[in-house]
Image (cartoon, rainbow, N blue to C red):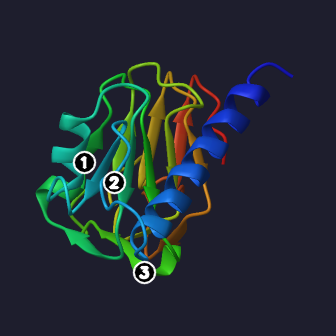
Amino acid sequence: MPGNEETLKALCFVAAVAASMLVAGCGGGSSSPPSNVVRVPQDQATLAAAIGAAASGYTIVVAPGVYSGAANRDLNFGGKQLSIAGSGNPAAVIVDCAGAARFITFDHGEGRASAITGLTIRNCGLSFEGAIYALNASPTILGNIFETTQGVSGNIVFGFNGSPRI
């Protein structure tokens, strides 16, 4: 089926980057990330800043912690093919939208290589579309935990004219 190979490559890449980040943090190696990785909060303090600093093909690796505030919600890749991956246990990498907005919108034709993996996403989605909105896009949303997150439509992820992989 078309797209499966692209999805598998994206997921393998995210897993490899996350594993390399964990190993680097355990000593015995350089703590510098590969050039196509932006670390939050080590390299950029917020998710929005990391998205701004990243080019297509980059992975944003998010360390355990709670990320809240305007620069960590209502995000948009703007057509970049990026991955946001929590490092370690998804229950320890928390994005809290504080009931103020959705977490992310995909609306620039992002494909399967655009991915959200390994996060806990909470208190988002008070708009109609839910915590994640995909319009004319087909991102990959895997291995996440959603808590107290629901749109008026009843959806956590709302997609229209695309086919998100969930």
The reply to whether callout 3 and callout 2 are in contact (CB within 8 Å) is no
Q: Position of residue 31 (x, y in %)?
A: 31, 62
Q: Amino acid at mark 2?
A: Phe
* Residue bearing the label numbered 2: 103
Callout 3 secondary element: helix
Q: Amino acid at mark 1?
A: Asp
As drawn, the residue found furthest toward the right would be: 1
Q: Which residue is mark 3?
A: 92
Label 1 sits on residue = 74
Residue pictured at 44% horizontal, 61% vertical: 21
**Is tag 3's residue or tag 2's residue first in the polypeptide sequence?**
3
Please name whichever residue, 149 or 44, is drawn nearer the observer in this view of the structure.
44
Q: Position of residue 112 (x, y in %)?
A: 60, 31
Q: Which element type, helix, strand or loop, lies under badge 2?
A: loop
Q: Nearer the viewer, mark 3 or mark 1?
A: 3
Q: Is residue 22 left or right of residue 50?
A: right
